[in-house]
Structure formats: C-alpha cells, structure tokens
Image (cartoon, helix red, strand yellow):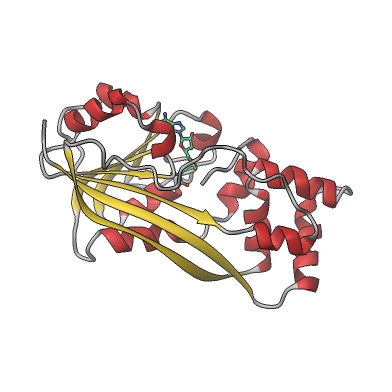
C-alpha cells in the first residue's frame, strides 16, 4: 500500500477496501486463536483494526494522520489513538498480546519502535507485519488513463526479521483474485491521489466517480481484482 492520501482520496479509501486484511489475517492466525488486547499500528481509516477485532477482546489503534482517523469507522471494541509507532512508549508495559502492522511497517520501522515493541508486548506475544499490492495498472491502461509509475522505494515486504528479539512463526506471499462491483472498483481507483489526479484529467467534467462507473460499465463485464499479498508473523522472544 503506497497510496498518497489527501482528504478526497481518504473519502474513497474509506468507501471501499477489498477484504484483504481479513484474508491475510486468516493465513497467519488460527481460526479459534484469541487475544486479550491487540494493537494495530498505522491503522489508517481502521480497516486493519476492524479485521483484528475478530481475534481480540479489545483493540487499540494508532495512527499519526488525523485525516485518516477522522474518517475511521467506529467499532465497540476499538479505541483510537493518534501517534506514531514510537508512541507505544507512552502505553503500559507488556499489555499487547498481538500487534499488527498493515502496510505501515515501512513507515514506522525505527530502532525506537524495536525497543518499544519489546516493552509493550509480553514474551510469546505476536507481531504480524503484512501488506498487499492491488494491481490496478492494467485497469488504468484499459481506461486510457495511465498515471506516472510509483517512483518511491516503498517495500511491500518490510519486516522485522533482522531484529533478533522476534522469531519468525509464519511467512508467505500469494496472488489473490477477487470479484468486485463497478462502484467498488471506482472507489478503489480514486482512493490514491496519483490515480485520482490522472482520472480527473481523463474525465475533466465534474466528479470523476460516476464517469468512471459508466466507463467501467461500457468497457468491462465481470470485474476482478488481482492483489499480491505479503505476510510474516513473529513471536516475541524477549530482551
Ligand atoms: C498504507 S496506510 C495503511 C492503513 C491501514 N493499516 C490499512 O491497512 O488500511 C499506512 C498508514 O501508516 C501510517 N503511518 C505513517 N507513518 C507512521 C508511523 N511512523 N507510525 C505509525 N503509522 C504510520 C499512515 O498515516 C497511514 O495511515
């Protein structure tokens, strides 16, 4: 997830996310496994947090970006906190039985986070780093609305395998294919500011959302979405 966000993109981002968080967590957490307290670092609009609630009595969510938190969906099990991963230092010791990073570890990984994670999780606690890349270039090309390639050095496989306080339990990558509606595809295409800008140029008259839905209607039958997923689960070995 390398999307550039602003408030318009965040609105489309919040309107539809493919259920990839759930599908990935099902690959790293056993069906009847449960945790008392979970933490989702870099929760964004909360999709990764909501996916984690299935396995936890209570979930804390942390994100430094106020505009993401402002559109985050409420949930009775979730408490939202504003701050970076390093803000873990202000939270109680050994409180989180599971910590997830969904598309956020690349941004959050620092030496200080390493110390704070050891402090905030009990021995044998779980850390899950996961990410996905939704493959939309082909759809953009079919629409004739190419946008500049991502020039960042973003790493979907960001992990903490080089931190010896944590041992690898599960690791994997897969390509998934999901069915989506035209409106879902339009929200997804507009959820990143780079694609949004390209689509505004392509559909210059008014809000590009309905134009896009109409265009997808004309050009494509059953829509599918391909995504590459990346996941690693670690056990806290201790200091
Ligand atoms: C690609 S989004 C992922 C959002 C959410 N986890 C999801 O799966 O939908 C990356 C998130 O990481 C957050 N982020 C950026 N720097 C961070 C840091 N140092 N610590 C924690 N989160 C950070 C951003 O604000 C953004 O919400």
In the image, 86 versus 168, the foreground residue is 168
**Which residue shows up at 18% across the image and 37% down it?**
164
In the image, 170 versus 39, the foreground residue is 170
Residue 174, relative to residue 122: is it above or below?
Answer: below
Q: Quadrant for ligand 1?
A: top left
In the image, 216 versus 72, the foreground residue is 216
Residue 11, relative to residue 95: is it above or below?
Answer: below
Tell me residue 45's x, y (percent). 49, 43
**Which residue shows up at 80% across the image and 72% down it?**
218
Q: How many marks?
A: 0
In the image, 31 versus 141, the foreground residue is 141
Tell me residue 86's x, y (percent). 33, 25
Res. 42 visible in picture? no
Res 41 → quadrant? top left
Res 51 → quadrant? bottom left
Residue 42, relative to residue 185: is it above or below?
Answer: above
**Which residue shows up at 28% across the image and 27% down it?**
88
Left or right of 235 in this view: 190 = right
**Which residue shows up at 62% across the image and 55% down it?**
188
Res 42 → quadrant? top left
Tell me residue 19's x, y (percent). 46, 61
């Amino acid at each position: 997830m390398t999307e550039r966000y602003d408030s318009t993109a965040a609105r489309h981002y919040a309107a539809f996310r493919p259920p990839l968080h759930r599908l990935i967590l099902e690959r790293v957490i056993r069906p009847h496994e449960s945790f008392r307290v979970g933490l989702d670092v870099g929760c964004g609009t909360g999709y990764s947090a909501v996916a984690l609630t299935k396995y936890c009595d209570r979930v804390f969510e942390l994100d430094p970006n106020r505009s993401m938190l402002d559109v985050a969906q409420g949930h009775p099990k979730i408490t939202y906190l504003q701050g970076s991963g390093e803000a873990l230092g202000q939270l109680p010791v050994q409180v989180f039985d599971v910590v997830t990073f969904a598309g956020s570890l690349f941004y959050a990984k620092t030496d200080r986070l390493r110390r704070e994670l050891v402090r905030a999780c009990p021995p044998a606690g779980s850390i899950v780093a996961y990410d996905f890349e939704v493959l939309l270039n082909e759809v953009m090309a079919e629409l004739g609305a190419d946008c500049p390639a991502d020039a960042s050095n973003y790493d979907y496989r960001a992990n903490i395998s080089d931190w010896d306080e944590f041992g690898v339990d599960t690791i994997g990558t897969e390509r998934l294919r999901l069915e989506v509606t035209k409106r879902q595809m339009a929200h997804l295409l507009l959820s990143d500011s780079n694609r949004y800008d390209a689509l505004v140029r392509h559909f210059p008259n008014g809000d590009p959302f309905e134009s896009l839905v109409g265009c997808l209607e004309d050009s494509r039958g059953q829509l599918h979405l391909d995504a590459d997923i990346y996941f690693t689960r670690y056990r806290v070995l201790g200091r």
